[in-house]
Image: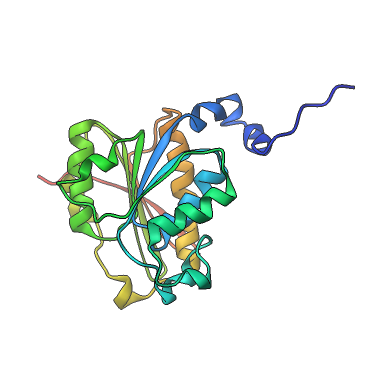
Amino acid sequence: MATKKNNRYSKHELVKQIGERAQEMRNKTVTLVGLAGVGSVLADILVRSGINVRLVDKGRILEDEIQQTSVFLQEDINKFKAKQAKKRLDVINDSVSIKAFHEELSEINAYLLDSDLVIDCTNDLKVSLIIDKYCSKKKIPMIYSYVSGSEGQIFVIDQGTTLNEISDYVKNKRVREEGIMAATIHTSAGIIASKAAKVLLEIPNEKNMLVFDAWDLTFEKQYVRKNK
């Protein structure tokens, strides 16, 4: 009896919602802005799925960020996030394109966002609005994410909606004040990865903001109305 040839993506391809279209995803590129927590875990998930990534972050790895991530190690403390993430991810999967940009995103270098999908993991509303403005202009789909404490928000922004139009729904608490659970980081990254797959395969996402609490284990689809 003939058996199906195994490969590193075979389990991924068995998922009925993806199937043979997995190759389409592996031909796409995702830009991740912010690698402190959600961004670094998400980069790990995407690279293991064979998806090309562009990593944008000017910061250095802090000791209190190690507990949030699955990519960085203790020996990486004080090294540049984007460069070190690329180094680690190249080992995980050397068959994908991984580009690192040790830069702070601004309106001047927003061209770094050019890709099939941009995921905002900055937790910084000022930077989020820069990403939103560029993606809206270039018609690049964007996934906005926010995490703090045990709470998270995730929203897919594509043609017809901008982050600025729904800013009344966006939380802006700071991790440095609220802290962060590793469970919050990983829950958010997993959900975003699923939504990213739909975007890359051009499968419609729900027009709701997903709000969750990783401590209370609550998930709510919050209908969002544009600001007047």
Q: Position of residue 12 (x, y in %)?
A: 62, 37
How did the renderer colour the structure? rainbow
Q: Position of residue 211 (x, y in %)?
A: 37, 56
The number of numbered badges drawn on the structure is 0
Residue at position x 18%, y 52% in the image: 167
In this orientation, does residue 159 appear? yes
> Quick check: 185 above or below 100?
below
Residue at position x 49%, y 54% in the image: 87
Q: Position of residue 28 (x, y in %)?
A: 44, 32
In this orientation, does residue 214 appear? no
Q: Position of residue 95 (x, y in %)?
A: 56, 38
* Quadrant showing the C terminus: top left
* Quadrant showing the N terminus: top right
Q: Is residue 108 left or right of residue 51?
A: left
Q: Quadrant of residue 58?
A: bottom left
Q: Nearer the viewer, residue 77 or 117?
A: 77
Q: Quadrant of residue 196?
A: top left
Q: Is residue 1 left or right of residue 151?
A: right
Q: Residue furthest right?
A: 1
Q: Quadrant of residue 53?
A: top left
Q: Is residue 110 left or right of residue 65?
A: left
Q: Nearer the viewer, residue 76 or 174?
A: 76
Residue at position x 23%, y 46% in the image: 131
Q: Residue furthest top?
A: 2
